[in-house]
Amino acid sequence: MNKSEFVDFMAKNTGFSKSEAEKAINAFTTSTIAAMKAGESIALVGFGTFSISEVAEREGRNPRTGDPIVIPARKQPKFSAGKTLKDACNNSDSETKASTAKNKKK
């Protein structure tokens, strides 16, 4: 699903207009980027956690020449899926609803 398809999907499921859905998606992505750029992580319970991990400098090889090169250190964005998202991807809808109801009773 690309962004325009996602905007259509969100508009259909929320009752927003397409422009409102696009504004909401853009607000989420720009806010997420700004928070992660500032070094913060974003935890959406059940959905997942967006975070930044540090990748150390390392030595690699130029594939053309075979000469060693230094690959600089960098920050890598990371997403860890939450339990609800994992369950939804691995179970049918009826199983997911049943497990959610079961977890609420505990």
Image: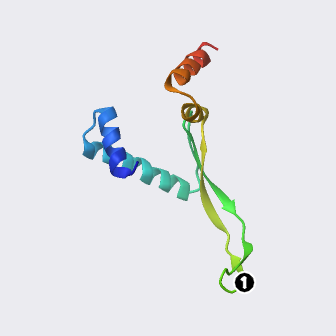
Q: Give the answer, above or below, for where 75 lies relative to 69.
A: above
Tell me what residue is drawn at x 69 percent, y 63 percent. 55
83 lies above or below 34: above
> Secondary structure beneath disc 1?
loop
Q: In the displayed image of the protein, which residue is found farthest to the top?
A: 105
Q: What residue sits 55% from the left and 16% below the top?
A: 101
Q: Residue at x 68, y 81 (%)?
A: 62
Residue at image coords 39%, 51%:
2
Quarter location, residue 65: bottom right
Choose between 1 and 27: the one closer to the eye: 1
Q: Is residue 67 left or right of residue 10?
A: right
Quarter-of-image position of residue 47? top right
Q: Position of residue 25 (x, y in %)?
A: 38, 47
Q: Quadrant of the C terminus?
A: top right
Neighbor class of circle 1 (other Cα within 10 Å; few <14, some 14-19, many 20+) is few
Question: Is 74 rendered above or below residue 49?
Answer: below
- Depicted 64 relative to depicted 9: above or below: below
Q: Position of residue 98 (x, y in %)?
A: 55, 18
Amino acid type, mark 1: Gly
Residue 20: where, in percent of width, then height?
28, 43
Residue for badge 1: 66
- Image quadrant of residue 60? bottom right
| For residue 74, side relative to residue 93 (left or right) | right
Q: How many marks?
A: 1
| 36 horizontally vs 12: left or right | right
Q: Residue 92: percent from the left, percent from the top? A: 53, 27
